[in-house]
Image: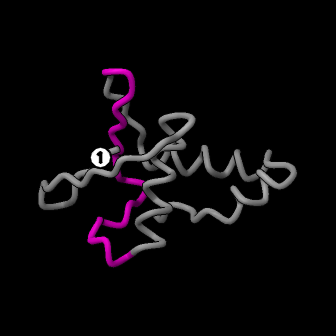
Amino acid sequence: MTTTDGEGRRHSLDVQAESSYDAAHLYVCHVKNMPASGFPIPTTSTTFEVVANGKILTVSGRSLRKWIHVRREEGKGPRGMLFKKRPMIGD
């Protein structure tokens, strides 16, 4: 999971996720829950690069925001409640 900041520096984080969107969302969670990590705070203009099975997949911040919104609406039971506690990506 990699993003690039405004100065062109790349920031990577290893995560175990169910999908490329889940990986991007876990990055958002890490950055927002650990601001001292030095990672740039992602916004809807951020592009996330996810490497899985030797392929590079990209997720835009705008599409991640939509994915989070849908998942929050569909979430049921304990798993849904935990998902709803994850932070949202900013504008």
**x%, y% of residue 37?**
31, 71
| 21 in the magenta segment | no
**x%, y% of residue 53?**
38, 21
Query: Does 9 sit above or below residue 15?
Result: below
For badge 1, the amino acid type reads Thr
Residue at the top extreme, as displayed:
54
Which type of secondary structure does the marked residue at label 1 adopt?
strand
- What stretch of residues is rendered in magenta? 35-54
Residue at the right extreme, as displayed:
77
Q: Residue at x 24, y 55 (%)?
A: 11
Query: Does 42 sit above or below residue 16?
Result: below
Q: Residue at x 48, y 72 (%)?
A: 33
Residue 59 falls in which quadrant of the image?
A: top left
Q: Is residue 66 left or right of residue 7?
A: right
Instruction: Identify residue for label 1.
Output: 2
Q: Residue at x 70, y 46 (%)?
A: 71
